Image (cartoon, rainbow, N blue to C red):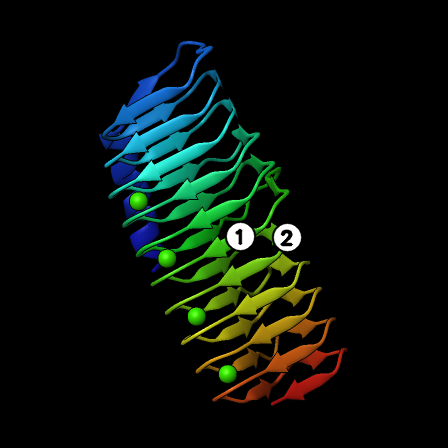
Amino acid sequence: MKTFRILYKAVLTLACFAATPIFANDLELEGDWTLTGDVDGNVKITDGTLTVLGQLDGNIEQIGSGSVVILEGASVDGNIKELGDGDVFLAGNIDGNIEEEGEGCVIVVPSADGSLDGNIKEKDDGDVIVEGNYDGVVEEEGDGSVIIEFGASSNGDIIEKDSGHILVAGIQGGNVEESGDGNVIVTDTGIVFGNVFEKDNGTVFNFGQVFGNIIED
Ligand SMILES: [Ca+2]
Ligand SMILES: [Ca+2]
Ligand SMILES: [Ca+2]
Ligand SMILES: [Ca+2]
């Protein structure tokens, strides 16, 4: 998965062409684009990947195939909606909510100065993977899991529905709620400060530390 991601990013870098001017209006783009300058307006992109390197003061909507990549050092003051095939990679500063629908994941990448001030909603196939630090609520619906990796931390609640698991190998500050098929797994490096709710099929495997209550339906 990681190799794929690195390769994927390298391909993106080669495939994208850059847009550098300062825009005062909304943008409607098609194909792969990289925004390197300041953009003041909303960006709507169809069938292509949007990579943000600069400062965007507006919302992002990605439609069809393609992903949204917010690189380290970039900032987005707005919401991000990603539809159809493709993922959302978050390493920059984002002041807004993330919504991912269709096949594809939401990945919070570790970064020195990145921060995400909003909630993540992921639907249909795909996981939410937290590799960095994240403060908002994670909601995952449909096939797919929520994974807090070793060294990562998440402070909001995690709500996971339908098939898929919640796996905590890092630090989870809020509550954890898993409903539908699937388990809650706290690995030997995992710490959960909140409560753990496990509903429907599945069980709680706690190999780490859970400071809240464990409630199984
Ligand atoms: Ca897409
Ligand atoms: Ca998805
Ligand atoms: Ca799920
Ligand atoms: Ca369950």
* x and y, in percent, of residue 138 in the image: 56, 59
Look at label 1 and name its amino acid: Ile
Q: Is residue 13 left or right of residue 168?
A: left
Query: In the structure shown, which secondary structural element does the residue marked by tag 2 occupy?
Result: loop
Task: Decide: is 143 above or below 79.
Answer: below
Q: Residues within 10 Å of mark 1 (few under 14, many from 20)?
A: many
The residue positioned 60% from the left and 74% from the top of the image is: 177
Query: In the structure shown, which secondary structural element does the residue marked by tag 1 occupy?
Result: strand
Q: CA distance from mark 1 to mark 2?
A: 7 Å
Label 1–label 2 contact, CB within 8 A: yes
Q: Which mark is residue 159?
A: none
Tally of numbered discs: 2
* x and y, in percent, of residue 27 in the image: 37, 20
Q: Residues within 10 Å of mark 2 (few under 14, many from 20)?
A: some
Of residues 137 and 192, which is closer to you in this image? 137
Residue marked by disc 1:
120
